[in-house]
Amino acid sequence: MISLVTGAAGFIGSHLAEELIRKGGQVVGVDSFTDYYSRGIKENNLEYLREQEGFTFIEGDLLDLDLEKLLAGIDYCFHQAAQAGVRASWGKYFDTYTRCNILATQRLLEAAKESRLKKFVFASSSSVYGDNQDMPLREDSLPRPLSPYGVTKLAAENLVSLYYKNYGLPTVSLRYFTVFGPRQRPDMAFHKFIKAIFKDEEIFIYGDGEQTRDFTFISDIVHANILAAESELSGEIFNIGGGSRISLKGTIKILEENIGRQAKLRCVESQRGDMRHTWADISRVKDLLGYKPDVDLSQGLVQEIEWLKSLPDTT
Ligand SMILES: NC(=O)c1ccc[n+]([C@@H]2O[C@H](COP(=O)([O-])OP(=O)(O)OC[C@H]3O[C@@H](n4cnc5c(N)ncnc54)[C@H](O)[C@@H]3O)[C@@H](O)[C@H]2O)c1
């Protein structure tokens, strides 16, 4: 079994590629090292993979590469590459979001329709939903993204569905709810909060801290991708969440308990594009793919804390 993982140097892509290798598969990883965060961090993410015989890395941009050639002989494509992050997606940066999230996905789908892929798994996002929805969020809720990032993820998800409907490309889109764990991106809340607590620095809370999130541990996201690839189902969209929600202030209490130090909080103005609440209804993916989250927030945070502690610039 040969898989292509796009965005293989990123947080989720690197974990997914490792698990595919551990399961005895071969993986082609592709990444262009976008400058959203440092190349050094992404090189560290690739450290284990680069030593694996079954892993081949291609440095390149999905906007430039010969994608038909890239997909030749591939069984499963896990499309994780994207310009991530809600807050940076406004203004002049929208151009990068449209290129990396919409155009790159369309190019990959065009090549995939000519290929012999058994499954095309797409990393979508809870950001497609937006606010004012009934909770928990169900896949059939009307998507109304609040951020330009969410707009691009929804556009890409719609393209994925189009290639299933029009060309019979076997696709599954997974709407990830805030992913955490070792290698979490440096712009994400837990990564920043944990470092700030260790360094006795202020944590900036956008809004009142009562906003809630459904957090999903990285190994559960990886498992969901593999279930989606192995399933007979196509043309589906599934929420992938941790199955419960907690306020931001609640998460800080858990961090304080685990680290054994008090956090210094400062509430600042809420950010444009941030959803007030997220909470995934995961009953569909439970019933149809047998997905169930295995790692709860507290257990997962211990792993993220340990990972951050091991980095030279944390303490
Ligand atoms: N982390 C989360 O909480 C979360 C939540 C919902 C959805 N997602 C989605 O999951 C996927 C992975 O997210 P992540 O947190 O690992 O982000 P990440 O930034 O760590 O990884 C994405 C990788 O894609 C690469 N990339 C971007 N554009 C590319 C292009 N045109 N060609 C080649 N490589 C390119 C980047 O260099 C980066 O290494 C993304 O599609 C993101 O939208 C993430």
Image (spheres, helix red, strand yellow):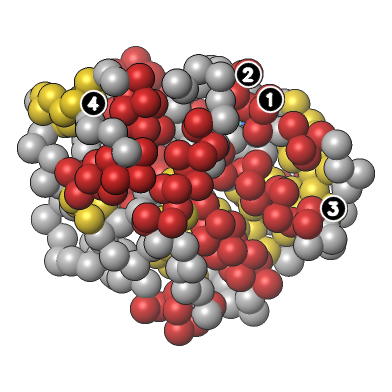
Q: Position of residue 43 (x, y in %)?
A: 68, 25
Looking at the picture, tell me which residue is in the foreground, 81 or 178: 178
Q: Residue 43 carries which label?
A: 1
Tell me, yes or no, whether the two marked residues, 3 and 4, touch with CB atoms within 8 Å: no
Q: Mark 3 points at which residue?
A: 26
Spatial CA distance of label 2 from label 4 is 25 Å
Tell me if I can see residue 256 in this picture: yes
Tell me, yes or no, whether the two marked residues, 2 and 4, touch with CB atoms within 8 Å: no
Of the two numbered discs 4 and 1 on the same chain, state the one appearing first in sequence.
1
Q: Residue at x 34, y 15 (%)?
A: 92
Q: Tell me if residue 307 comes above or below residue 231 in the rendering.
A: above
Amino acid type at mark 1: Glu
Amino acid type at mark 2: Gly
Q: Is 292 on the left-hand or right-hand side of 56? A: left
Q: Residue at x 73, y 66 (%)?
A: 118
Q: Mark 2 points at which residue?
A: 40
> Callout 3 environment at 10 Å: few (<14), some (14 to 19), or many (20+)?
many
Tell me, yes or no, whether the two marked residues, 2 and 1, touch with CB atoms within 8 Å: yes
Tell me, yes or no, whether the two marked residues, 3 and 1, touch with CB atoms within 8 Å: no
Q: Name the residue under label 4.
A: 203
Of the two numbered discs 3 and 2 on the same chain, state the one appearing first in sequence.
3
Q: Position of residue 245 (x, y in %)?
A: 25, 60
Of the two numbered discs 2 and 4 on the same chain, state the one appearing first in sequence.
2
The image quarter containing residue 265 is: top left
Q: Which residue is drawn at 56% across and 44% down?
A: 12
Spatial CA distance of label 3 from label 2 is 25 Å
Amino acid type at mark 4: Ile
Q: Which of marks 3 and 2 is in front?
A: 2
Tell me if I can see residue 155 in this picture: no
Residue projecting furthest to the right: 53
